[in-house]
């Protein structure tokens, strides 16, 4: 007499499981492990996933995200900022590396560059706002270049020739990324 074995049904994924996977994907993108088309493709897969197996397949080639990465040797610390269902603010005097990434998931963020020390003549800010609003404040005399989805820029005045450049590359899903510049006063 043989007993038929049936495989256990796949465990269903919750909204929280999908949210955590989205944060993991955005972190991988910020670390340079995924490019924008890969990120977009994987986001669609996460949003459509019904089971843990489907979610696991989306990030099978990525680190688990559980370990805290070591600070880079020989380079500036602070290239990455994340807010998960909370707020993040960078203001006052701080060192801004040539490439900086901010990921805000269901929260808010402010990057105030008025007192920041720019590491180079061109600074690239990669900003991701998922159901969030991120505000970037630039000082007078800085040229702003903004592109992406959900990114707006309101900068007043003409920067001088050779002015430092802040390039904002953003992606806002059900949110906004706003770049604001101040009017230079004599």
Image (spheres, grey):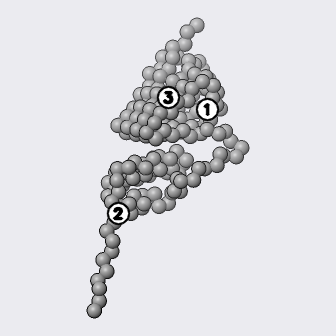
State the SS at label 3: strand
Label 2 secondary element:
loop
Q: Quadrant of the N terminus?
A: bottom left
Q: Report the residue at 56% width, 37% height from top.
A: 100
In the rendering, at what x and y percent does residue 131 appear? 37, 37
Marks 3 & 1, CB-CB < 8 Å contact: no
Look at discs 3 and 2 and give the one toward the viewer.
2
Number of labelled discs?
A: 3
Residue at position x 44%, y 21% in the image: 154
The image quarter containing residue 85 is: top left
Residue 137 position, x and y percent, is 51, 24
Q: Earlier in the sequence, mark 3 or mark 1?
A: 1
Classify mark 1: helix, strand or loop.
strand
| Residue at point 62%, 35% (across, down) | 97
- Using residue 123 as the reference point, say whether residue 6 is left or right of it: left
The crowding category of the residue bearing disc 1, from other C-alpha atoms within 10 Å (few below 14, some 14 to 19, many at least 20), is: many
Q: Which class describes the residues within 10 Å of circle 2: few (<14), some (14-19), or many (20+)?
A: few
What is the spatial separation of the Cα atoms under label 1 and label 2, in whole angstroms?
43 Å
Distance in Å between CA atoms under marks 3 and 1: 14 Å
User: Residue 26 placed where, x, y %?
Assistant: 47, 46
Residue linked to disc 3: 110
Task: Look at 35% across and 37% down and name the residue there.
Answer: 174
Sequence-wise, the earlier of marks 1 and 2 is 2
In the displayed structure, 139 sits above or below 123; it is above
Seen as rendered, the residue at the extreme right is 74
> Badge 1 is on which residue?
96
Q: Which mark is residue 11?
A: 2
Q: Is residue 11 left or right of residue 125?
A: left
């Amino acid at each position: 007499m043989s007993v038929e074995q049936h495989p256990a049904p796949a465990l269903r994924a919750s909204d929280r499981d999908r949210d955590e996977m989205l944060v993991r994907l955005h972190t991988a993108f910020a670390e340079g492990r995924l490019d924008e088309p890969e990120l977009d493709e994987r986001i669609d897969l996460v949003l459509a996933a019904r089971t843990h197996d489907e979610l696991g397949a989306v990030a099978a080639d990525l680190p688990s995200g559980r370990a805290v990465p070591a600070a880079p040797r020989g380079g500036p610390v602070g290239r990455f900022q994340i807010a998960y269902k909370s707020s993040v603010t960078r203001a006052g005097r701080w060192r801004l590396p040539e490439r900086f990434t901010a990921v805000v998931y269901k929260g808010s963020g402010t990057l105030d560059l008025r007192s920041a020390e720019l590491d180079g003549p061109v600074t690239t800010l990669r900003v991701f706002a998922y159901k969030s609003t991120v505000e970037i404040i630039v000082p007078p005399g800085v040229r702003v270049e903004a592109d992406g989805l959900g990114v707006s820029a309101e900068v007043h005045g003409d920067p001088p020739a050779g002015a430092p450049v802040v390039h904002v590359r953003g992606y806002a899903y059900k949110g906004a990324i706003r770049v604001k510049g101040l009017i230079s006063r004599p």
